[in-house]
Image (cartoon, coloured by chain):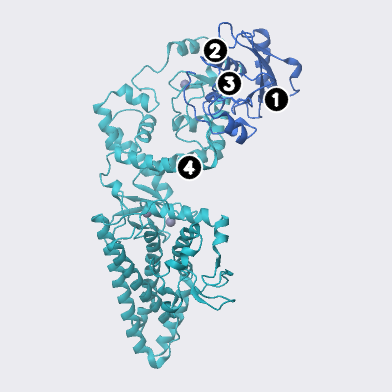
Amino acid sequence: MFEEDSENEVEDEDEEEEEEEDDFVDMGMDAEASGTHPKHDEEDFPFQVLTADEIVKHMVDCIKEVNTVVQIPATITRILLTHFKWDKEKLMECYFTEDQDKLFSDAHVVSPFRKSFTPAAAAQAASSSEIMCEICFLMIPPTELTGLECGHRFCWQCWREYLTTKIIDEGMGQTISCAAHGCDILVDDQTVMYLVTDPKVKLKYQQLITNSFVECNRLLRWCPRPDCGHVVKAQYYDCKPVKCKCTHIFCFACGENWHDPALCRLLRRWIKKCDDDSETSNWIAANTKECPKCHATIEKDGGCNHMVCKRCKLDFCWVCLGDWEPHGSSWYNCNRFDEEGAKKARDAQEKSRHALQRYLFYCNRYMNHMQSLKFENKLYASVRVKMEEMQHHNMSWIEVQFLKKAVDVLCQCRQTLMYTYVFAFYLHRNNQSIIFEENQKDLENATEQLSEYLERDITSDMLVDIKQKVQDKYRYCESRRKVLLDHVHEGYEKELWEYQDGN
Amino acid sequence: MASMEKRLQKELQALQRDPPVGVKVDTDKLTSNLSEWTVNLTGAPGTLYEGENFVLHFKFGSRYPFDSPQVIFGGANIPVHPHVYSNGHICLSILTEDWSPALSVQSVCLSIVSMLSSCKEKKRPPDNAIYVKTCSKNPKKTRWWYHDDQV
Ligand SMILES: [Zn+2]
Ligand SMILES: [Zn+2]
Ligand SMILES: [Zn+2]
Ligand SMILES: [Zn+2]
């Protein structure tokens, strides 16, 4: 049977992810893993940041540690450890309690306790006449043939070619097996480093080995920032924020930007959805709508959601298609896709558009905060200028630090708000979700006000006054943010959240 | 001479000197650098394909034998078999995932003959229609699911 290309591949990925999670549970490393959800960033989560060299050292230390208890060659230990996803305890437990021959064969390695040569290979090696290499079909002196413990022997040149193809063309490292047909014995790292001579191929192999060590090790994660090359090493697996040496902060569980209050799983789905939809014609279709009154086709050309139909002059909200009147003067008041109020108008539009609009509603807000966060550096720079100005007006360095703190809080709140829209998109309506939406609205309003304060010009005579106001505002934002997150976390603990399917 | 050509030269010599039953290289159709071969197969006696003649086309890349050859049935008679599509593509794991440089034209031909010989009912793969409509010309670009080797 063949596999259909596009669609099935997608499903495949999902399956792989699930498999991965199942495997983790099987490994018995962390019983709570399946219920991993974001936790408060203030809680203690011990971790270290390692450089590339330190990762290699860590890998070697793991092997040494196992070898103090299990006396087998280090190359075999590495293959066994990879088989157990670098869970030392699990390896030692199986090593001492289960059938060792089965353990070695499951890990695709010849037991080191078996004789190192098969009689046939030994006989071949003993005879002095030339033997045919079964890859190049040339007659080769026996001393120039080599192989693994499985006894399959090929000439050096063929081994080199074979390994180079696997490493460079197929990107394989730890999983390269013997070149003989049907032989699943894995080529160990020492053999590869010995047979391969090209330094470029060697380097690539070492990178592949290190990468698979990090990728299959649950307590390690690459910093996702391009070209960073650091690895975060945690003591246990959890959905928690970690900060790399390069200053990037990300979720240890999934590697995305820290996304509290959204679940890793739903964030992944959301990102995929955003990627897919932006390319489809649906997106374009969604950017034109019909006026709810006269049905003229309207194209949105600005950022504001307050629409005026050019033909019938109806004022309405782009997002919910409801009357503009109750929205007031601030667009962010439409932070709730009120299913009651604007229902009638929306029903008139195609049904398929509804789902799309709902998505666009959440997507717009998500993107808006993301966009604002991108100007973070600009904001810090402009605040720095203000802080200097203030110091010329008899305020001390200490006294003006509140402004930097205010930007810190603003960015934190925007980041949280951004991910509240991911959380809300998949949320099924219930009493708790209504409380959540209220909290979201409060935080959204407070954050926009704080943002406004920071953009306003500051004159010397209002310095003291503005300091008090900004401090009050960011403290309020901080407390609203905490209230919102605490409520979501509590909901996770008590299993109060229900999710929508099919999005 | 490239290593691919050297090895194919040796394979050709061996196949002509000592051809396995039911396998014959059509030397008239060999290309000058040996990168394309045509092999005639005959269904083994006592099997569903007894007396039938088939044509296999081989294409070798410059990385052969480290890279697997492209192998498809051609000609007028494509065997009706649960692992052979009507366009000649073959679902056989040694042609992609399980390829080893120690395999050869001879071992591929023998695997295909044995695949035909063990067949109990002449029929096309269940997904033949859709596959033939949507597949790439090169069967190596298909992601195959290998079900069972028993059929
Ligand atoms: Zn050789
Ligand atoms: Zn072997
Ligand atoms: Zn980093
Ligand atoms: Zn995450």
Q: CA distance from mark 3 to mark 2?
A: 28 Å
Disc 1 marks which amino acid?
Ser
The residue positioned 36% from the left and 47% from the top of the image is A220
- SS at mark 1 in the image: loop
Vertical comparison of B77 with A378: above or below: above
The chain that appears blue in the image is B
Residue that carries the numbered disc 2 in the rendered image: B117
| Secondary structure state at the residue bearing disc 4 | helix
Q: Indicate left or right for B37 with A9 as reference.
A: right
Q: Secondary structure at mark 2?
A: helix
On the image, which quarter does residue A156 sit in?
A: top right
First in residue order: circle 2 vs circle 1? 1
Nearer to us of marks 2 and 1 is 2
Residue A90, how many percent across, how many down? 28, 35
Q: Position of residue A50 (x, y in %)?
A: 38, 51
Q: Residue A336: x, y in percent?
A: 39, 68
Q: Which of the 4 image quarters holds residue A148? A: top left
Q: Quadrant of ligand 3?
A: bottom left
Residue for badge 4: A207
The span from disc 2 to disc 1 (Cα, nearest Å) is 28 Å
Spatial CA span between label 4 and label 3: 28 Å
Specify the chain shown as cyan: A
Work out whether disc 3 and disc 1 sit on a shared chain: no
Mark-to-mark CA distance, 3 and 1: 17 Å
Contact between marks 4 and 1 (CB within 8 A): the answer is: no
Determine if marks 3 and 2 fall on one subunit. no
Q: Mark 1: few, some, or many residues within 10 Å (few <14, many ≥20)?
A: some
Q: Secondary structure at mark 3?
A: loop
